[in-house]
Image: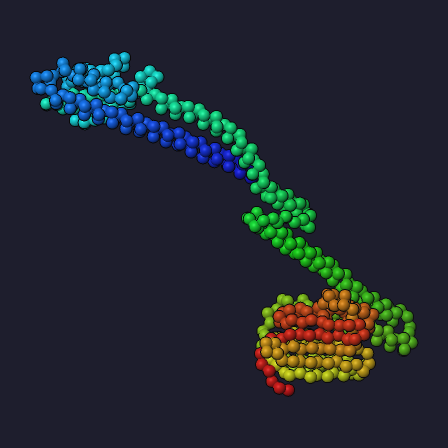
Amino acid sequence: MRFFWKVYFSFTVLLLLAFGSFGTWMIQLTFEKSYQRVLSEMERENRMFQLSFEMNLNTLDEIYQNDSMIPATASSIVNNLSDSGSIYRIYSQEQRLLYENRSYLTLDDELRRTLESKEIPCGYQLLRIEENTYLLFACRSIINSRIYYLENIQNISSIYAEREEYYDWYTIVMLILAVVMTILIFIVTHMLTRSIAALSRTTKRFTRGNYEVRAVEKGRDEIAELARNFNNMADTISEKMEELTMQAKKQEDFTASFAHELKTPLTSIIGYADMLRTIECSPEETLEAVNYIFHQGKRLESLSFKLLELIVSDKQDYAFRPLSLQKLLLEAAKLTEVKRAEKKIMLRIRMRDTMIIGEKDLLISVFTNLLDNARKALEQNGTIYIRGRQYPNNYLLCIMDDGCGMEQKELSRITEAFYMVDKSRARKEGGAGLGMTLCNRILAIHEIRWKIFSLPNKGTSIAMQFGSRKETKR
């Protein structure tokens, strides 16, 4: 069953039961009050009847206090009482009827026997005769050791008829109320559940592939909160799917780039090797072909080493230890010194040493790649600057050059595998587009924040933020 109908039927049944129970209770309460009122009035009348009867008999001489005087005395008393429509009767100790003011009602003597056997002074009994209901109230009176039973009887069918009339009217009211309530509850239920229905439709559209659809957020109730949670979930799923899509695209680009980077040098190597194998070349041509094969072989070797470092970097558990940042940079500078010397590139270092926590070989690889990239971006007689500054909670290191720089749109892709801003220059310098990817991976392992700033024909600056452990003066 749908949630709408569950809510609709639940509200309808509960309200009908509530109104029905309340109405029945009110009618019954009204009836009970009427019944108790009649019972109290009859008890008062019976007490007055008894008191008058005893006073009148006690005023007579003992010779007149016999059963023959009872009818006259009782008749005088009843005539003086208010006419409430009650039937008055007097019985002797032997259960013989001595007086009654009306004789059309025949009743049994069950109540009188109860008063006699249990010695109860007063009591009442409800009697149903044909279609009428009577209330019988009786008491036992003792005069000069003689017992009399005084009864008054009243027809109380009117209060039962009144109750039945209330029930009939309430049944009609309940039928009208049921129709009105079912309509109102239907409208209210529809208003309460339409947000859920809308959210359900949105969910179906989302599951069918419409990942841009979002639920409408209205109000501050639980349904609105559910809609907000759904939208947050949908945003997260969309982001994850975009990430997966981008990851798949990057994987495809990586594979295509890797195949291309292998194909280009291999084609040249195979071509020159085939030429040397099949054609008799001059010494100059042979030397040129051998040199080309050598350089392309070195390029393939560099590519394989870079790929190996990328694969291994995420799959090892490294032992981090305190290291001197200045010593790491000097070692990286020494490794790139020969290549810098070819272009007469100066390296200027101005920094205060600090101790960092990391893995030595990985960090040297980062600094070597960054210094080598700066060298490739510079022309003859260029300069690379290394600056370091200590702050209260961290250490900031910058590697800068005044080379060719790059466009802003290139910065977001610079860490992608095989991505090269200037492919011809990168291949000429022996690059494969993996250096910055490797740097990004290693810095992430060390949780080192970094950022690249660059302008065309102005140069590039790379800033790295280290958590400082200890500072020493140079």
- Residue 19: x and y in percent read 45, 33
Q: Nearer the viewer, residue 75 or 259?
A: 75
Q: Residue at x 86, y 67 (%)?
A: 271
- The answer to whether 44 appears left or right of 67 in the picture is right
- Residue 195: x and y in percent read 60, 44
Q: Residue at x 61, y 54 (%)?
A: 232
- Residue 55: x and y in percent read 15, 24
Q: Residue at x 83, y 70 (%)?
A: 424
Q: Residue furthest top?
A: 104
What is the quadrant of the C terminus in the image? Answer: bottom right
Scheme of colours in the image: rainbow
- The answer to whether 141 appears left or right of 12 in the picture is left
Q: Residue furthest bottom?
A: 474
Q: Residue at x 33, y 18 (%)?
A: 132
Q: Quadrant of residue 83?
A: top left
On the question of residue 111 being in view, the answer is no
On the question of residue 15 being in view, the answer is yes
- The answer to whether 456 appears left or right of 38 in the picture is right
What is the quadrant of the N terminus in the image? Answer: top right
Q: Quadrant of residue 71?
A: top left
Q: Residue furthest front?
A: 80
Q: Is residue 74 above or below residue 300?
A: above
- Residue 100: x and y in percent read 22, 15
